[in-house]
Amino acid sequence: MNKAQMAMDYSVWDSLLHASLVVQLTLLTLAIMSVISWAIFFAKRKQLDTAEEGNTLFSDLFWKARSLDEVDEKADRFATSPIAKMFKSGFSELNRLADSKGDSTKTSVPKLTGSDNVARALTRSMDIEISNLEKRLSFLATTGSTAPFIGLFGTVWGIMSAFHNIGKTGAASLAVVAPGISEALVATAIGLAAAIPAVVTYNHFVARLKRIELQMSNFSSDFQNIVRRNFFVDEK
């Protein structure tokens, strides 16, 4: 088999096995980033699915319940619902205000003041829940933005190797340049293979998070309107 035939038979696997150490480390880095990105994808998809399902079920309970105390008794059943956790925070603050005034949330006569405390409790809880839902998404964004450039680094190094081989042999035949060019193109391909799914999944999750955040914001407004109308004398 002559050199030309050897160059034609040079497979992608051969490119990986015979690539320079720098290119192999680059490819390994991209492979690790890709594996972590896919792991984040499956974990985050499950987390958001359960959060949305929990929000739907808790919202049904909230609007069908006869009192906030009834909702509070059942809220712990919805551990995956960010809205349920917001309710617990807001209702706990409402009870704290009632205890400090010596009143009860069961009364039908508004007697409390300081509804801004409830609003702050809801906002604080919402921020915590959103932060929890956003965890690890930054890695997807980082992978999507940096993986092509990491692959490009491997590409440049592979082309440099090809020119180095030309300099050593004094010939520019296909058999001489094929290994370096091949590993360069493989690095580009793997860089894109790591970046594209990361960008797509990141954008998908951001859109879902915006929907969940809107649900939480709407619930916060509804809850504040209910407690102001029923428990506070300063805001109706």
Image: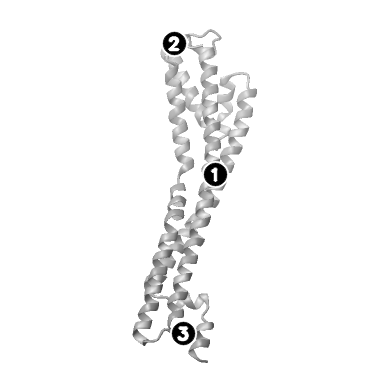
> Where residue 152 sits in the image (x, y, percent)?
42, 64
The reply to whether dot 3 and dot 1 touch (C-beta < 8 Å) is: no
Kindly report which numbered mark, 3 or 1, lies closer to the viewer in this rendering.
Answer: 3
In the foreground, 200 or 159: 159
Q: CA distance from mark 3 to mark 1?
A: 51 Å
- In the rendered image, residue 222, in percent from the top left (x then y), is placed at 55, 22
Amino acid carrying label 3: it is Ala
Measured from the top left, where is residue 131 in percent x and y?
44, 39
Q: Earlier in the sequence, mark 1 or mark 2?
A: 1
Residue in the image at 52% along x and 17% along y: 227
Q: CA distance from mark 1 to mark 2?
A: 41 Å
232 and 207: which is toward the camera: 207
The residue lying furthest to the bottom in this view is 1
Q: Which residue is mark 1?
A: 47
Between marks 3 and 2 in the image, the one whose residue lies nearer the viewer: 3
Name the residue nearer the viewer: 12 or 165: 165
Residue to which mark 2 is pinned: 102
Residue 113 occupies quadrant: top left
Q: Amino acid at mark 2?
A: Gly
Horizontally, is 29 left or right of 220 in the view? left
Rendered image: mark on residue 118: none
The residue tagged 3 is 175
Helix, strand or loop under label 2: loop
Q: Position of residue 6 (x, y in %)?
A: 51, 86
Distance Cα–Cα, label 3 vs label 2: 89 Å
Q: In the rendered structure, which disc, 3 or 1, sits on the residue that comes first in sequence?
A: 1
Amino acid type of the residue tagged 1 in the rendering:
Gln
Above or below, comparing residue 71 to residue 156 in the picture: above
Residue drawn 50% across and 87% down?
A: 4
Q: Secondary structure at mark 1?
A: helix
